[in-house]
Amino acid sequence: MDVPEPRVDWRSKGFFLPEGERTAADYAKEKPSLFDGGFTWPVLALRREAALANIATMAAYCARHGFAFAPHAKTTMAPGLIAAQFDAGAWGMTVATPNQALVLRKLGAGRILIANEVLDPAALRWLAGQDDIYFQVDSPAGVAAAASVEAGCLRVFVELGHAGGRTGVRTLEGLESVARAARDAQRLELVGVTAYEGQLTTQREVDDFLDLLVAGVERLRAAGLTFPLVSAGGSAWFDRVVARLAALPSDLRLILRSGASVTHDDGFYRERTPFRRVPAEGPLTAALEIWAQVLSTPEPGLAICGMGKRDAPFDEGLPVPIEVRRDGRTIAATGMSVSKLNDHHTYLAADGLAPGDLVRFGISHPCTAFDKWRHLPVVDEDHRVVDILETYF
């Protein structure tokens, strides 16, 4: 991939640069401390070693189990991390929208999976001229929209869904009907079957749904519908995807799409990672942290920190206080908890804090953390800034 060198200036939140600009190479050479005055609060930082370890862990996991890996790039939309995943052996990348696919293609990414149906004529015309970009269909309308493109070739997965879930055909009869329509349509190529199990809440529900996916693949093949690919896998149940899809014939390429694994977290995925069920296969480590300053301690047991909904995710759990930094020393944030966020304020239940203290927070749900930041300092284990990560949202 062609990753442009990130540059930061006065527009970059968390970097305090009233004048001039700095490049990633500047930080790599100088390795300034995150706390030396060149940064301001709040700031979201990426721990380099943790992220690289997570990338290596998932690459090794997929290789051990015979899966190709196409992690969901919408988690980060960060060229630096996407390139690192390709360097570690990723087969492709998954995205949520044609616009995200365009970004990755402009950066030089090869195989791209759009994990959605595409109905927009402008996007379909562009996709028809691209190699190795795939998207999903789950309805006759989706097939008809794709088939209406007058030139080129579109490569589609037919998607199986479940009751109460998002997209996807709800029955095997419907799956076969849509697959036949895709096969028979001009300028469409049926490349596979896909599903998403991440919204299910129990292992029994997940296993039953994945078994239905296996049955659907077998049904289509028995009906003479041929394709090379089968895809599934969010970040909460990928061990069950590996276990249940093992029943599929060996001539199919199985693709895992788990995206949040690249940075993991200290909340939602810490509790739901498959490596809690299969610890010998992991682990993953939280690689994102937000440093915020205590602005006020207006009453006993309450500290107000300068961080809010514009800075930290809150849809799958509130930020998690980890440690406090004061006068260059850190102590564990034992007994502290976040009760709510405003746009720019965090309500922290805590005793013993003072205005000016820095609090390191872990985040819950990386997919809604990266989109709030254009640039992130990348830090080593001593919190020296060694790189800049840029996002393309």
Image (spheres, grey):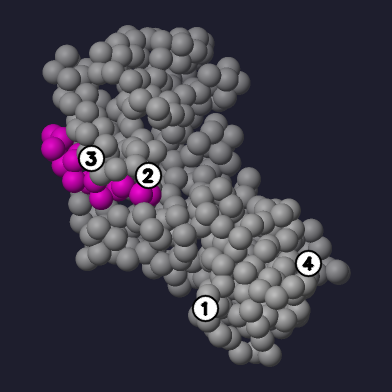
What are the residue bounds of the magenta stretch?
235-250
* x, y percent for residue 209: 26, 32
Residue nearest the viewer, comparing 145 with 241: 241
* x, y percent for residue 86: 41, 53
Quadrant housing residue 350:
bottom right
- Checking the image for residue 70, the label placed there is none
- Left or right, 97 with respect to 196, comes to right
Q: Residues within 10 Å of mark 4 (few under 14, many from 20)?
A: few
Identify the residue under disc 1.
Answer: 334
Q: Distance between the Cα atoms at labels 4 and 1?
A: 39 Å
Amino acid under label 2?
Gly
Quadrant housing residue 299:
bottom right
Mark 4 in CB contact with mark 1 (< 8 angstroms): no
Of discs 2 and 4, which sits in the foreground?
Answer: 2
Identify the residue under disc 4.
Answer: 21
Give SS at disc 1: loop
Of discs 1 and 2, which sits in the foreground?
Answer: 1
